[in-house]
Amino acid sequence: MSKQKSYLILFLTFLLCLLPYEQIFAAGYIKSKEKSKLVDIRKLDKTIVIDLRYATKNNFTKKKIYPAAVPLLRKETAAKLVKVNNEAAKKGYRIKVWDAYRPFSAQRTLYNAASNKSYVAHPSKGSRHNRGAAVDLTLVDRKGKELLMPSAFDDFTKRAHRNNPGMNKTAKKNMDYLTSIMKKHGFRTISNEWWHYEDTNWEKYPLLDVPLTSFK
Ligand SMILES: C[C@@H](N)C(=O)N[C@H](C)C(=O)O
Ligand SMILES: [Zn+2]
């Protein structure tokens, strides 16, 4: 390689380093609503309870992160979730969704706000929520009352861990039931957040940065 070429590569690498890493990674994210294949869960099943925490101040950041409360998921993932809700309905339960699709820009905000980074996916690799292929949820009874679970949503402590030896027996039974119906319909778990489920096919779906407001 000529000296000139080497200097040019060095110079371009230097320029790249000046860009914030978010801009480099976000560049490859899909930004168009049409290309995203995201669907509004409410349009598929009106009985699913929606409480999008990041669209309110009632979340670990104490700030409203989402400008619009629109519960979106990748269409294939949403179809799986409807099956789970139908299954839960046989027992008189319904799903309550705390988070679904999360734009990349919000991932960065959540990551920066989290005191313990091990509970939020690093923006450089992206969250499965950024693909519309992950959902944070719990179960409610006929009256809309939440079933007892191991911890509150986004309790970033050992209480949220699936294998916490000190877990309350009823909470474990409820968590195990939720896990069984989620797994039956094509979701998988992560070890340290009992409320987080991801589509087993998440890798097939692209990273997205479509604004929630475009679905309002
Ligand atoms: C922030 C928390 N609710 C969450 O979703 N964590 C997972 C690991 C993520 O960011 O993908
Ligand atoms: Zn999650």
Image (spheres, rainbow, N blue to C red):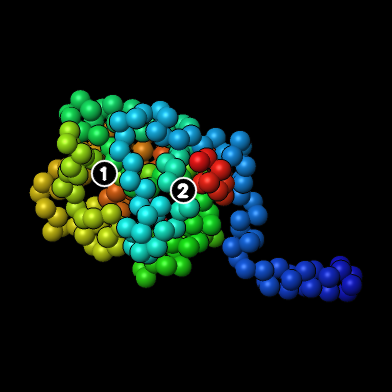
Q: Amino acid at mark 1?
A: Thr
Where the N terminus falls, by quadrant?
Answer: bottom right
Residue 17 showing in the rendered view: yes
Give the answer, above or below, for where 27 lies relative to 177: below
Between 186 and 78, the one lying in front of the other is 78
Q: Which residue is mark 2?
A: 68
Q: Amino acid at mark 2?
A: Ala
Q: Residue at x 46, y 53 (%)?
A: 66
Q: Which residue is mark 1?
A: 138
Q: Quadrant of residue 11?
A: bottom right
Q: Position of residue 15 (x, y in %)?
A: 74, 71
Q: In terms of sequence position, does the residue under pointer 1 or pointer 2 come before the other? A: 2
Q: Residue at x 61, y 58 (%)?
A: 25
Between 29 and 64, the one lying in front of the other is 64
Q: Is residue 60 left or right of residue 89?
A: right
Q: Disc 1 and disc 2: Cα gap in Å?
A: 21 Å
Q: Is residue 167 left or right of residue 116?
A: left
Q: Residue 44 got which mark?
A: none
Asked if the residue under mark 2 is in contact with the one under mark 1, i.e. CB atoms within 8 Å, the reply is no
Between 84 and 106, the one lying in front of the other is 106
Q: Residue at x 19, y 49 (%)?
A: 149
User: Is the residue indicated by label 2 positioned so its CB lies within 8 Å of ligand 1?
Assistant: no
User: Is the residue indicated by label 1 positioned so its CB lies within 8 Å of ligand 2?
Assistant: no
Q: Position of residue 3 (x, y in %)?
A: 88, 74
Mark 1 crowd level (few <14, some 14–19, many ≥20, 10 Å Cα): many
Q: Residue at x 37, y 70 (%)?
A: 115
Q: Secondary structure at mark 1?
A: strand
Judge depth for marks 1 and 2 and give the one in front: 2
Q: Secondary structure at mark 2?
A: loop
Residue 184 showing in the rendered view: no
